[in-house]
Image (cartoon, rainbow, N blue to C red):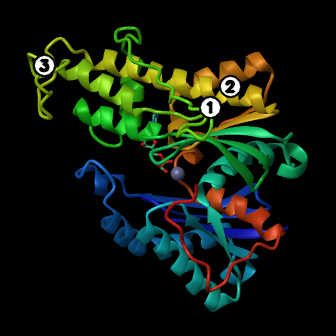
Amino acid sequence: MTLILGIETSCDETATAVVRDGRTVLSERVASQIDLHAKFGGVIPEVASRSHLEALFPLVDESLQEAGVTLGDLDALAVTTTPGLIGCLLVGLNAAKGLALASGVPILGVNHVHAHIYGALMEDLDARGVDAAEGIEWPLVSLVVSGGHTSLYESTAPDAHRLVGRTIDDAAGEAYDKVSALLGLGYPGGPVLDKLAAQGNPKAHDFPRSRPKVVTGGGKAGRFDFSFSGLKTAVLYGVRGQDGGRGKPLRKDAPPRPDVVPADVAASFQAAVVDVLAERLMEAADALGARGLVVCGGVAANSGLRARVTAEAEARGLPLFLPPMRLATDNAVMIAGLGHWLFAEGKTGDLATDVLARTD
Ligand code: KG4
Ligand code: ZN
């Protein structure tokens, strides 16, 4: 049996959790900073770091208490070390190092993106009472889709994930946030646009389903890569008009066209994003002989994406692992969960363990 405390501070959620055996959640806490950053329209790194510093230790105490364990009962402290905002990662890692020094419990540096993938499996594993070695048929093809990432991985074990595709420009969640800002709907954009899309006509605008150009022999893009910047520009033109009149460039602050129906823009934009994500996931799954699919990260909370990949997985007879809503966005359950496997493999860190802003 392993008992692991997870610590997550890579972006704008401070989160802690105690997890047994990589699948059973004994306690979980998330302090979201969304309200703090909303007025800026995005995450301000320094504000985020300071807020983690204030929130983290009370959350650690609450998590341990609720789980009914003490620091000394733990096998390890799993903490996100990559990727993320450097100052934010440092708050989590240094807190973990302090706790490790005080208790003698080892730390484990965890890759946040790999943890998103593993986190999508945990509820299913717990419900079946099996672990990821016996309960999952590998390989899985995993789509990680959030405000910072839109990537495809070939997953061959709980902590073995090979990058096979990624966005060459914006992440899908970032595109949601930018379109929401354009419509004056605030931050974060995903949940608002998702709701609004349900009331609109997805065929009202014919937005592009772009695919980066693959140049054989070492070009920029790979066959499973994504691009969302063309879609973002198309939405901008759809909302504000093609240009400033007579071919002049469009002013940044141009008012929306009077005939624009925000729900139609949201529905058409969502249809384009979902088409691209689902198509590329299925292409990769077919090409790599996937025996299961994972969709995770903040955008995995999207109702359109969930419905589409559920239908596609069913049609192929593949198991689909979708995290429950609370585990789709950033959390420490997934960090503690993946920590179980790192611990089993002896991949503990020490005081020299460092953070890394970008991984792939
Ligand atoms: O994984 P996450 O919490 O943080 C990052 O690592 O980025 O993802 C946050 C992102 C935001 O861009 C947010 O707009 C998006 O996930 N998001 C959604 C939905 N809920 C959150 N995007 C589309 N539909 C949603 N329902
Ligand atoms: Zn995340």
Which numbered disc, 3 or 2, marks the residue that appears first in the sequence?
3
Position in image of residue 325 (x %, y %): 56, 40
- Looking at the rendered structure, the kind of residue marked 3 is Gly
Which numbered disc, 2 or 1, marks the residue that appears first in the sequence?
1
Taking 80 as reference, is 31 left or right? left
Query: Which residue does the image show at 62% across and 86% down from the upper left?
Result: 351
Residue 142 appears in view: yes
Secondary structure at badge 2 equals: helix
Query: Circle 1 is placed at which residue position?
Result: 223
Query: Circle 2 is placed at which residue position?
Result: 283
The residue sitting at the front extreme is 217
Where residue 247 is drawn, which disc sits there? Answer: 3
- Looking at the rendered structure, the kind of residue marked 1 is Arg
Query: Which residue does the image show at 55% across and 45% down from the upper left?
Result: 326
Which numbered disc, 3 or 1, marks the residue that appears first in the sequence?
1
Compared to residue 2, the image places residue 71 above or below, namely below
Residue 58 appears in view: no
* Quarter of the figure with residue 282: top right
* Quarter of the figure with residue 215: top right
Tell me the crowding category of disc 3: few under 14, some 14 to 19, or many 20 or more residues within 10 angstroms, Cα based.
few
- Looking at the rendered structure, the kind of residue marked 2 is Glu
* Residues at circles 3 and 2 in contact by the CB criterion of under 8 Å: no
Secondary structure at badge 3 equals: loop
Query: Which residue does the image show at 47% across and 24% down from the upper left?
Result: 210
Label 2 within 8 A of ligand 1 by Cβ: no
